Every structure is written in structure tokens, then in C-alpha cells.
Amino acid sequence: MKKFINSADDFLKESLQGFGAAHKDIVTCYYNPNFIIRSKYAKKGKVALITGGGSGHEPMHGGFVGYGMLDAACPGFVFSSPSPDQMIAAIEKVDCGSGVLFIVKNYSGDIMNFQMAAEMMTGPSETVLTNDDVAVENSSFTTGRRGVAATIIVEKIVGSLAESGGSLVECKNLGNKVNKNSGSMGVAFSSCIVPAAGKPTFELRSDEMEFGVGIHGEPGRRRDKIKSAKEITNELLNAILEDLKPENKDDILLFVNGMGGTPISELYLIYDNARKMLDNKKIKIARSLVGNYCTSLEMQGASITITKLDQELVNHWDTPVHTAGMRWGM
Amino acid sequence: MKKFINSADDFLKESLQGFGAAHKDIVTCYYNPNFIIRSKYAKKGKVALITGGGSGHEPMHGGFVGYGMLDAACPGFVFSSPSPDQMIAAIEKVDCGSGVLFIVKNYSGDIMNFQMAAEMMTGPSETVLTNDDVAVENSSFTTGRRGVAATIIVEKIVGSLAESGGSLVECKNLGNKVNKNSGSMGVAFSSCIVPAAGKPTFELRSDEMEFGVGIHGEPGRRRDKIKSAKEITNELLNAILEDLKPENKDDILLFVNGMGGTPISELYLIYDNARKMLDNKKIKIARSLVGNYCTSLEMQGASITITKLDQELVNHWDTPVHTAGMRWGM
Amino acid sequence: MSVDFLIKKAKEIKIVIDNNAPEIEKLDQEIGDGDHIFNVQRGIKLVIELEPIIKDLPMSEALNQIAMKVLSGIGGSSGALFGTLFMTMGKSSDIDVGVDYKKAINMFAYGVEAVKQRGKADVGEKTMMDVLIPVANCLKQGIENNKDLKDLMREAIETAEKGMLSTKNLLATKGRASYLGDRSKGHIDPGARSSQLMIKTVCESILNN
Amino acid sequence: MSVDFLIKKAKEIKIVIDNNAPEIEKLDQEIGDGDHIFNVQRGIKLVIELEPIIKDLPMSEALNQIAMKVLSGIGGSSGALFGTLFMTMGKSSDIDVGVDYKKAINMFAYGVEAVKQRGKADVGEKTMMDVLIPVANCLKQGIENNKDLKDLMREAIETAEKGMLSTKNLLATKGRASYLGDRSKGHIDPGARSSQLMIKTVCESILNN
Ligand SMILES: Nc1ncnc2c1ncn2[C@@H]1O[C@H](COP(=O)(O)OP(=O)(O)O)[C@@H](O)[C@H]1O
Ligand SMILES: Nc1ncnc2c1ncn2[C@@H]1O[C@H](COP(=O)(O)OP(=O)(O)O)[C@@H](O)[C@H]1O
Ligand SMILES: [Mg+2]
Ligand SMILES: [Mg+2]
Ligand SMILES: [Mg+2]
Ligand SMILES: [Mg+2]
């Protein structure tokens, strides 16, 4: 296992401490239980946005704590849901009486732990469940689709509404709208290595890729021979568009996300291929995001997320944000 | 070769096109010859900052074109110096009569090509040569040390001075000062793959690392067994500090840079280890930067850069910057 | 059932789980994310470490402390599920005045019911519920029909094993494995395996008493 | 020497370089960044493609176009170095009225001198200068002493080969290889090898004429 690491047990703590120290103007980290909050308290009366999930997806979510986005993030162990005590401790610091909105990716573990936190806390709370991964067939009888990179779009847009005074229900409704308007799909060229496991989560041959991979290295739709960037981009886009069915007039946000081990030059190449295909389909890219935002440790791979935009969403997307992982307008 | 790529020949062009399209509010890309300039012209009378170098180090340099930093960047082929016609074409667009400052990393190819551009252009120009890599023994009889990640620190700080009206000579002098105040060293866990070559530049065994590696995968000081993050960080820091010899009272900027294939969670862990060691040495970290800024395609690895700061440098570091790769204050 | 009994069983379970760790790890790698064994091992270790703190506490408080430890120390699905199990068991009525086998079985059944609510999974969805629910039902029926305790323990061990094995050919519809669709078939569920081993350990130790 | 001659030689060089590509690639991988062969191949291809544009131009303009193409099409060290060579050769005086062997050799020597200025490398620094400088000197001396042309070509081929081989045991003090320190020893310099092959090709074709 080739990692900058001292021991698997200390990985998360040391990484969090470094993150907290490097960005102490933006965030404050607490340990045992672990959670990250803004270093400057949000204004009174603001709905508190709290999220969390397994670690290993950095900058998600700690990197999105700050003005205009999250109030707190609760990082679990690598790829493991956080536990309710983390949420409770974070709520104590950031809830200023207007309610707590949990933004939760659709994984059994995450859902159950956030649910327990909601039961344990005293004030009002609502939950937005993200499930944008179109790789997984949807069905009302199963756990359903996974929540992946669109979670970040939800966090940015709802973060903006909360900052501008949106109520708990308004924030929840907007979050659900963004999630419904979003679809994602990813592909992996290599596996990640969970520090505690010390070996790759899965094995790929030198000419293979995992199509529709999950952000923990879960198997996707199928294993396939490596293809050209155009073919991969085309297939990812088609899967997403089939699900989202945007109309000709729809504006979209095009988000090309790296899994952690792929250089951004390749992400920009995917972006270029995607924008030409969308252009052919007369779908207009109104906003763009390219980079490593929702990662899977050192996995080589990328995902595409599309969010259908209307004026409300564009406005909230454009408002200032000041976090370690996303910053503009301030 | 597992890359998001259509053909080695088209890699650079498609990647640049994607970059230009995704950030069209910040940059405009030109092709044949390739160069990147700000989408909004800088104010009249400003010294033009132009840089360039082989591609494959993204976001360096195109990602640092924009308000408060560079006026233009000239990307060569992957790991190959750009050619003088690129610089000449860029100069034509961004020179507004107050002279051109070239920021050049100390590589024979880069130096010669920028030199030819300087000879071919008509207006006045100066050059700042960066050579922060302490892995290479310095000597006045040889090419000397390589220019690596501190180039970005030079670009930010000189960019601020140029934006605030600094003259050509002032900009050059400040650039030289930042370079002299900076030292860097890196380590690689894996090789990168140059698209045209299609295979790794070098081979490392599963328990080996290259210590003091160059940003093109050049061999470093030695090949060694993988060590703990603490041991690696300690050795990188010591090599840099031995060279920079900061005094007890010196403030520094601590920059932990990823090579492209290492997740930021590990970079933060290195940052954490480094800050504790610096704390023990009573060296104060006044500013921090952590992320993938000066990369080597998909190489797994990291480098540490330290810049000794004084009030002038801190002030220029803190001014607003608006580029694709670095943004704050606006 | 005493707090001392709980701690003793935890120690016995630790040995059994450690012995079967590679197998459980592999199961979660095949249809999950590979961490189930680490989660379970971490949880057991934390429970055992609680000994000095809980050994003289009333049963309800001891179980609540165990629940909180499991909940916060494991994380993930199994943290919430096992946490819910112990938390709910600790909320059963009258347990601080002494717990006989009948009460213990009712506590367990009550806990399993809460786990079912928590995870929204029933028998047949390829989760630990394929072990927990049948075992809880078997124990409850047995104790209500005044079955011989040792026979009942043997029956529970068999029921757990049957439930665990049944997950192999099931299609997962809950938990991470559900993302695999048809490819989840052919693998035993890791949570079912770890639960079955824990139940077996406890029942066997009662048998051999 | 005519523009037609230049293009013909470029085509011959292409074949020789292509035949030796794996070796040259390996040399730059060992002590450089591995791209020298691609740079050279790209450059030659671009020069050959210039044929329809430059074939009827005066020598000075043709050389200048070649220089610009090499400069912009190759990039890297070799782009600047070979670009400087051709640009300077094109600036030699009186070349548009005809170039005999003596003039051609003076042009070449003039060009090599400029390359030396450009790269600030002299003989013994483990670069292409270890081939270019001795060959330029040998040719100049030979033509001044009115040596037989074919003998001179043979001598130039030998000098180039000797210079190229000499780089093997040198310590690099210029170019990328200099970052290697002592580890640069034991490898032939890729630029020296490609230059030597080009010189050999041109000289041999004159020999066989
Ligand atoms: N909704 C659910 N209801 C009951 N059990 C579940 C549910 N989801 C997952 N499980 C159980 O949890 C086990 C996985 O636990 P673990 O690996 O520790 O957590 P995670 O899935 O979060 O990585 C599965 O094998 C399954 O038995
Ligand atoms: N300063 C210099 N003077 C002369 N030749 C040089 C100099 N630097 C490099 N070279 C030559 O250039 C060759 C490398 O060329 P190439 O690989 O195309 O460029 P780069 O080094 O930029 O990758 C070396 O083998 C050497 O012969
Ligand atoms: Mg997990
Ligand atoms: Mg090169
Ligand atoms: Mg698991
Ligand atoms: Mg080279």
C-alpha cells in the first residue's frame, strides 16, 4: 500500500487535523466525536445544514463547510457512515433554533445513523436524501439509487438559500428539487485502497474499466474493456440524459468530477467531449464545474453529473461561497 | 495506458479546449500556436506576466491566468517546453506597453525558448528564473536546480505586485526574492505516463519510492523503501530547511503539493505532520496552501515547498486572485 | 442474565469472530465495501473495554452504555443496527430487578423488532435480518411453549445457520449489496454471517453450561 | 547545396531516425524525459511536409521557414537548438546565389557556433555539442586545407561517432541529464546520438554520390 500514512488507525485523525489547521480561517475541527464546523458562527436564525458520510471522498464534505454552504460535516471512518453522536455534537454547536437540515446520501448506513440522530435531538429537523447515481436501477422495493456527486450541487444551492434566510421546509424542498433535477454516473480505471484493508477493494486488468462504479469502489453496471474518452463520455451522458430527459430548452450544469487519481487535464478533456455532445443535442451548458470534488481515495476515474437548471437554481449557484473546496465571490 | 484520452496527438488540444470552455469567464484559449490569456483584458499600463512550460502540470500554468496572477500562459506539449512563436503570439495580445516579465522554470529547453522569444519581440522584457528544487545539488557550472512548485508562489506574489502597478524591474526583483526565499522537494510513489510514450516513464517496485523526484518523473536523490508519512515529511522538510536556513523568527508559507494521483486527504496528513515538526523548530506557519497545484500527470506523490515570508510577501499573497486554479477575495 | 454474562459472552464472541475474520472480510468485499469485519471487531473490542465502567451498573444502564459505544464506535450500517439492538434491549421493562431466560429472550426479540424498524428490511432481503428475525421467532415460541432450554439453544443455532445460508441465493434488496442487482446472488451476506456466529457462540456457551 | 538537397536529406534522415527510434527513446528515458525521439521525429516530419511550400524559395528563406517550423513544431531543448542551427545557417551571407561545399560547411559551422551560444554548452558537457562542435571544426579545417571531399566526409562521420560515444562516460553538466549528477554517467546522450545519425546520413549520401 503506497500512501502517505503513519498507521491506518491514525489516518483519519491526522488528515482531519491537517485540514483543520490548513484552513483554520474557514473551519474548526472537533475530535471524539469528529465533526467540522465553520470557524465563524453563522448568523442567528439560519437553518443549520449538516451533512456527513464516510471519509475518503475529500474535499466532500468537510471541504464544503463554510459561508454559503454547510454549517457542519460529520466524517465517518473511511467509507463508513458517521455515528449519531457526531451529529448530536455538531448540532449542539451550530443549531441556532431555526431547525436542522440533514443532507444525506442514500446509503443504508448513512440513513440509519442520521435517522437515529434526528430521533435523539430535541429540535426540529428535516432530511434531504440524494440519490443521483443513475448506474443503479431504481426500484421502490430496494434501497434504490446511490447518492454521489450531485450531493455537492445540493449542498451549494441549498446552502445559498439557507444563507439568505430560507426556512427549514423551503431548504428541504429546494434540496429535493436539485436532487430530482440531477443525475450522475462514473467509471473507474483503478481501485482505491482503504487504509484499514491495505489492499485494493477490487482488481481490474490493465485493459479493463468498471462502468457505473460507486464512490466506494462498488461494482457498477458492468466491467468493460477500456474505451476512448469519447465513447466513455458518450455512454455516461446518454445514461444520465435518459434518466433526466431534459427538454431542448433546458439549461444545465455540467459537472465533471475526478475520483482522486485522475489528473484534471483528463477531466477537462472529458468536459470538452461532453460539451460537444451536448451541443449536438441542443442542450445548453449554463454552468460548469470540473475537478476533484467527490472522490474515492486514490481511485483513477471520473464521473459526470448533470443538473437541470432554472433561474432559481442558477441564482443560488452563483451566490458567494467560501469553503476550502469551493470558493467564489468572496 | 489507462487515461481518458482519444489519441495522444489530440490530448493537449482537447484538454485545453475543455479548460477554455469550462472557464470562459476567466480565460480565453488560442490554438496554433497555443496560448491562454485572460478573458478580461488587464488594465492599461500593467506589466504583462507571461509564463509557460510543458503541459502535464495542470493547473500550472493555465490555471493561474486571471486577475491578480498571470496575463498569459504558453503550454508546450506534455513535458516539452513551449516554442517562441507561442510567447510572441501571447505577447501580442497582452503586452500593453509596460514590458513583459517572463516567469520561467529552470530547464534548458524552457530557458532557450523563452530567450529566443525575448530576442524576437520588440518591447522590453525581463525574466525571473525559478529554481527551488533542493533535491538537485546546486553548482554554478551546471544547469543548476530545477524550478518546481514555488513557481506558483512567485506567480501569485508577483501577480499581485503587477496588478497594483509595480514596474517591470520591481516585478522582476520581487520574483527573484520569492524564488530565493523558497525551497521545494518531492517524492513519488508511482510514475506518470506521458500519452505519447504510452508507458510509465520509470518503474518503481511495490515497496519503493523515488526521493527528490522531478516533476517530469526525473530520478531524484535516491530510490528508497517506502517509509511512514512522518519519516518522509521529516526528510523533505529537513532538506528544504537546510537550504533555506530560516531563522527562529521567520514566518513561512507551508505549501503541500500533490503530484496528481494522491488524494488530498493524504496531503492534509502530510501538512499535519509538517506543521508539528515546524512547531517543534519554532518556525511559524503564517500562510498555507494544500492541494494539487504543480502536478505530474497522474503521478502518485507529493512535494513540500516552504517560502520565507516578510510583510511585503504576506500582503501580496493575501490580495484577491481570480483564476481557475486559485481564487480568493473575489 | 447479568452484566457479567454480557461481558463474558463478548469475550467469547471476540475469539470466534477473530477466527473467522478472513471469511467475513471476503464476504463484504464481494457484495459490500469490505469493512464489515473491521466494524464488528472494533465494536466488540470497545464493548470489552467497557468492562470496568459497566460491571457494577444496573442492566438497563449497562446496555445503554454498550449501545452508545457500539453506535459511536462502529459507524456504518452495523453500528446503527447493533446499536439499536442493544439500546432497545436496555429499554425493556423491569430488567434491573433480574433477568431470567424468558425475560432475556423477550428483550432480544424486542430488540430485533426495533432493528427491523430501523433498517426497514424483512426476511428475504439478504441482510442480517435473515438470521435475527427467525432466531428471535424461534426463541420466543420455544420459551412460550416451555421448551427445554438446551433443546431451544440447539434449535436457535440451527435456525441461525439456516438463515445465514439462505442469504446465499437471495437477491439483495436492502443495504449496499442491493446496488449489485443480480450479481449479489451467490454470496452469503456478511452481516448474516457475523450475526449467526455471535448467536451460535452465546447459545453454545449456554448449552455447555 | 540546394533546397531540393535539404529536402532529400530530410527524407533520408527520417528513415535512419525511424530505424533507430527505440534506441534513442531509451537513451532519453535513461537520462532525460524520454521525449527526444518524438521531438526529432515530429521535427523531421514537419520539415518534409514543407516541401511544396519551400521548394522554389531562395535558400535563405527556405532555411528560415525550416527553422521556424522546427522551432515551433518541436518545442523543448531540441526545438530551440535545431531551430537556432537552421535560422543561423539561413542568415549566412550570399547563400541565395548558390551554395558550394565550402559555403555549406561554413554555414554549418556558423550555425553550430550559434547553437553553442544558445545552449551555453561546450564540448565535454554531455550534449549534442559533443558531436556538433568537433564535426564543425573537422569540416572547417578540412575544407580550408582543401582536403578531398570524400575523405573529409569519412573523417566527419568518424568524428561524429567518436563524439557521440564520448558522451557515454561524461558527467552531464547541461540539460536535463545534469539533474542526475553522477548517475548520468554510463549512458550516451540522446541528442548526441540523433545528431550523429543525421550527420552520418548526410555525409554518407555525399560519399555515395
Ligand atoms: N437496511 C438494513 N437492514 C438490516 N441489515 C442491513 C441493512 N443494511 C445493511 N445491513 C446489514 O449490514 C451489513 C453490512 O454492515 P457493514 O459492512 O458494517 O456496514 P456498511 O454497509 O455501512 O459498510 C450487511 O451485510 C447487512 O447484513
Ligand atoms: N544547453 C544545451 N546545449 C546543447 N544541447 C543541449 C542542451 N540542453 C539539452 N541539450 C540536448 O538536448 C537533448 C534533449 O533534447 P529533447 O529531449 O528533445 O529536449 P528536452 O530536454 O527539453 O526534453 C539532450 O540529449 C542534449 O543533447
Ligand atoms: Mg462501510
Ligand atoms: Mg522534453
Ligand atoms: Mg461494509
Ligand atoms: Mg527530452
Image (cartoon, coloured by chain):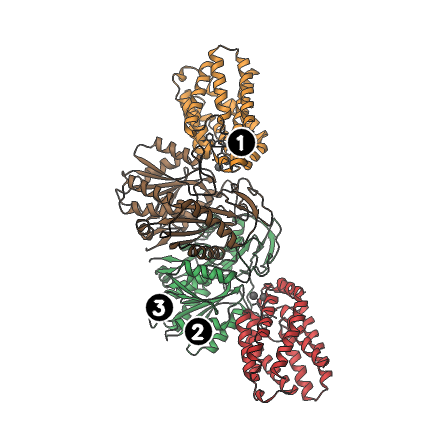
Chain colours: A green, B brown, C red, D orange
Q: Can you say which quadrant of the picture contains the N terminus of chain A?
A: bottom right
Amino acid carrying label 1: it is Pro
- Of badges 2 and 3, the one in the foreground is 3
Q: Where is residue C83 in the image (x, y as percent from the top left)?
A: 56, 75
The image shows residue A185, relative to residue D15, as above or below, that is below
Residue C66 vs residue C83, the one in the foreground: C66
- The reply to the same-chain question for discs 1 and 2 is no
Q: What residue type is labelled 3?
A: Ala
Q: How far apart are marks 1 and 3 (CA)?
A: 61 Å
Residue that carries the numbered disc 2 in the rendered image = A126
Q: Which of marks 1 and 2 is in front?
A: 1
Amino acid bearing label 2: Glu
Q: Name the residue under label 1.
A: D190
> Dot 2 falls on which chain?
A
Residue A134 x/y as whole percent:
52, 61
In the rendered image, the vertical position of residue C7 relative to residue D25, given as above or below = below
- Report if the beta carbon of the residue with label 1 is closer than 8 angstroms to ligand 2: yes
Q: Quadrant of ligand 1?
A: bottom right
Residue A172 shows in this picture:
yes
| Circle nearer the N terminus (2, 3) | 3
Q: Dot 3: what SS? A: loop
Q: In which quarter of the image is residue A79?
A: bottom right
Q: Is mark 1 on a helix, strand or loop?
A: helix
Q: Where is residue D28 in the image (x, y as percent from the top left)?
A: 54, 35
In the shown orientation, is residue D20 left or right of residue A87? right
Q: In which quarter of the image is the C terminus of chain A?
A: bottom left
- Residue marked by disc 3: A42
Q: Which chain carries label 1?
A: D
- Chain letter of disc 3 in the image: A
Query: How much space separates mark 1 and mark 2, taking CA atoms?
Result: 66 Å
Q: What element carries label 2?
A: strand
